[in-house]
Image (spheres, coloured by chain):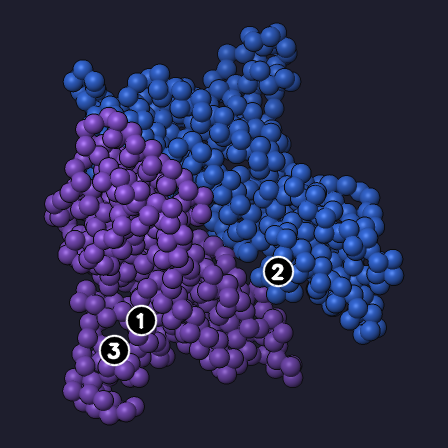
Chain colours: A purple, B blue
Amino acid sequence: MLYSKLVSKTSKSVAHDADSINAKFLLQAGFVRQEMAGVYAWLPLGLRVLRKVENIIREEMNALGSQEVLLPALQSKEHWDQTGRWDSVDVLFKIESQTNKTYGLGPTHEEVVTPLIKEFIRSYKDLPLSVYQIQTKFRDELRAKSGVLRGREFGMKDLYSFHATQEDLEAFYEQALQSYLTVFSRCGLDAKVVEASGGAFTKKFSHEFQVITPAGEDKILTTVDGTFAQNIEISELKEGDPSPENGQPLELHTGVEVGNIFDLGTRFSEAFDVAFTAEDGERIIAKMGCYGIGTTRLVGTIVEAMHDDRGMMWPATVAPYHVHLVSLSNKDPEVQERVWQASQELYEALWAQDIEVLWDDRTDVSAGEKFADADLIGLPLRLVISEKTLTQEAVEWKLRAEKEAALVALEDIQEAVSTVMAQ
Amino acid sequence: MLYSKLVSKTSKSVAHDADSINAKFLLQAGFVRQEMAGVYAWLPLGLRVLRKVENIIREEMNALGSQEVLLPALQSKEHWDQTGRWDSVDVLFKIESQTNKTYGLGPTHEEVVTPLIKEFIRSYKDLPLSVYQIQTKFRDELRAKSGVLRGREFGMKDLYSFHATQEDLEAFYEQALQSYLTVFSRCGLDAKVVEASGGAFTKKFSHEFQVITPAGEDKILTTVDGTFAQNIEISELKEGDPSPENGQPLELHTGVEVGNIFDLGTRFSEAFDVAFTAEDGERIIAKMGCYGIGTTRLVGTIVEAMHDDRGMMWPATVAPYHVHLVSLSNKDPEVQERVWQASQELYEALWAQDIEVLWDDRTDVSAGEKFADADLIGLPLRLVISEKTLTQEAVEWKLRAEKEAALVALEDIQEAVSTVMAQ
């Protein structure tokens, strides 16, 4: 992609509506644009990150044996009445149509998926069964805040599983937990598994996945080694107490919840009478679990966890592009021709190797501005081609996470890039 | 994919709410499930078709040089007031939040994209510029009908282009028109370019892309050779009149509109003051075009255009899978073992070649039922392995579109499948 053509615009000034580090950098670097409080448009750079995050999640959910579906955002009031949540879930947007029909606008999908899956379950042989979707959710939050961390419209992956027995549910729950850790790790995040309450949706226990950063809304009691972690909402312990696991002192941290998993029991399957015939002929209500990851929130969390004062620092797995190629020249047309020619060749050679390159081909911008933009956008590797590097038949190489630049010979650059991207 | 595990269920009876051929077959074959009137859930088979359609569109929009973004569904009332459409667009769902903030739920995105793109346009050098998204739209239709053809929630690709001059807009408009024909042709459809009115959104002329089928809501006057086609809404001619192009008699047909393109002029750019500085320093309002394709409607139209009385007939480009592999056996465990073993091997060999196979591995279903399901689901190629075919070291081969089956030697089957799928 040529930077000069990209629908994006970096800005030196912090947007007045940036209430968090993720909002500040995502807005300044032109990854997103705020439409209203808690409502964002995703521009090409931001959308590329979001799609990569979604694909990592999709791969891991498929590996769990779950099948992808797409459920509607418009939901039936009758189904929400059936679970008794129409009046109790205060974040539910309610819509009246011109023909006086009332809809809910999905903040979650138990009321859609449970009656849907009911049609596929007759006998114990039809279980276990799980489906997931990656879809837009709507929540009528009193206060939207923290950039893309808590919005009124946001992306989410939600998975729902159905089981014949509690043991089977627990085995799947444990697999899902491990799969979540893989997702977060592939996104470059160290997420802690934290015991938490079921929140508004269930009275049962649940687990949250918390990334420790100052931007978080949650308070977590955890040991240094991570063998114990509880949300203080449910903990009977306090900071400094010894961990019941190994006696280590508990520390209080702030975390962003990037995922959660719930044992729903029969809370929803009973409401919609999702029953199956057991081997002995008995009719039994199925057990359910639900498993969520906020996809847009995950993008924001990556920014909160990986940045410095100059900008973002994307891991290669989710960076919008792998390489930020900067061409520098003075005004001499002959020099510019040589630099741009060499840049074009490298740009094409790297793309031919499936290395994704953003080429800063602008001719009317200073070197300092280009470097500042590269740091702000935060691709893993910056390459610079200038008259100086070309006289040495080389490219300047600098990883975003490191301070020092080095020269790499033009003839070695493709292999060097491939090697570092494969790490 | 193993059919026995698939979240899908074919049904012999037509759903009572199927008001069209696409609804009948998509529901019966378990591609979609109706949640409410005009609101559908997409099950795994249907979602695979939808994703393939979306990817074809994405490739062609990228080839046009357009950049993908993702705009929010929640829209600002202030922006709709600014264009004067808050009260005039009757399909706009309106939402009131618990804090008494009012939102529109996007039926289209001029009110979002125009102020967004305004930020990227300063000089004539920033033009032309276009962005597109593939996103869910909401319309408060008085009457939802015709299955996924006219829904209250549906998928759409919408592209918006911005230009310095009328000539530049018209050149892009023509490129987009050609690109649309490529999209429909890749989806197996013969779409006619039809002159039409601008509808509710613009007073200017526009073009529709109509697929002639009895399910359509539009009446089209067209010649046999397609050199002339007008929506009767704007035509001053009638059935039987000679075409102004070449004198051929005009025929009256029913069509489904799968896409439309509009010259919006300065209707929206003026409302949001999207202006640029021309080469001579003059400040000029940019010109706009918009270009839509209903993605979910396109899936329904493919069903309307390609089916017989037994079921759907997907072109290989958008079929959920390429091959429907049917294993047949009597109750003899030794025979079943041999048939299932050979099926498993072929299944894996084809997937290794990127041929997508749905394997009907069910053991409790008759051959007749399996064949009926294969016809209903409508994958391009059906392969049958049974004791009989194995005694001849062969596989039974039948294209969905043909009546006759043939035997193909096991050793030739992989190459035969690759060859037919590449066509």
Please give the chain letter of the residue carrying mark 2.
B
Please give the chain letter of the residue carrying mark 1.
A
Give the residue type that dot 3 points to: Asn
Question: Against B106, is A108 above or below?
Answer: below
In the displayed structure image, the side of residue B408 where residue B294 appears, left or right: left
> Which SS class for mark 3?
strand
Q: Earlier in the sequence, mark 1 or mark 3?
A: 1
Give the residue type that dot 1 points to: Ala
Q: Badge 3 is on which residue?
A: A231
Question: Against B264, is A303 above or below?
Answer: below
Asked if the residue under mark 2 is in contact with the one under mark 3, i.e. CB atoms within 8 Å, the reply is: no
The N terminus of chain A sits in image quarter: top left
> Which SS class for mark 2?
loop
Whole-percent x, y for residue A236 in the image: 22, 87
Residue at mark 1 shares a chain with residue at mark 3 = yes
Mark 3, other Cα within 10 Å: few <14 / some 14–19 / many ≥20: many
Which of discs 3 and 2 lies nearer the camera? The answer is 2
| Residue depicted at 18% across the width and 40% down the height | A367
| Residue depicted at 35% across the width and 80% down the height | A205
Measured Cα–Cα span from mark 3 to mark 2: 40 Å
In-front residue for pair A414/A320:
A414
In-front residue for pair B4/B103:
B4
Give the residue type that dot 2 points to: Met
Q: Badge 2 is on which residue?
A: B1
Q: Badge 1 is on which residue?
A: A191
In the displayed structure image, the side of residue B5 where residue A89 appears, left or right: left
Whole-percent x, y for residue B168 in the image: 35, 20
Measured Cα–Cα span from mark 1 to mark 2: 32 Å
| Residue depicted at 26% across the width and 39% down the height | A391
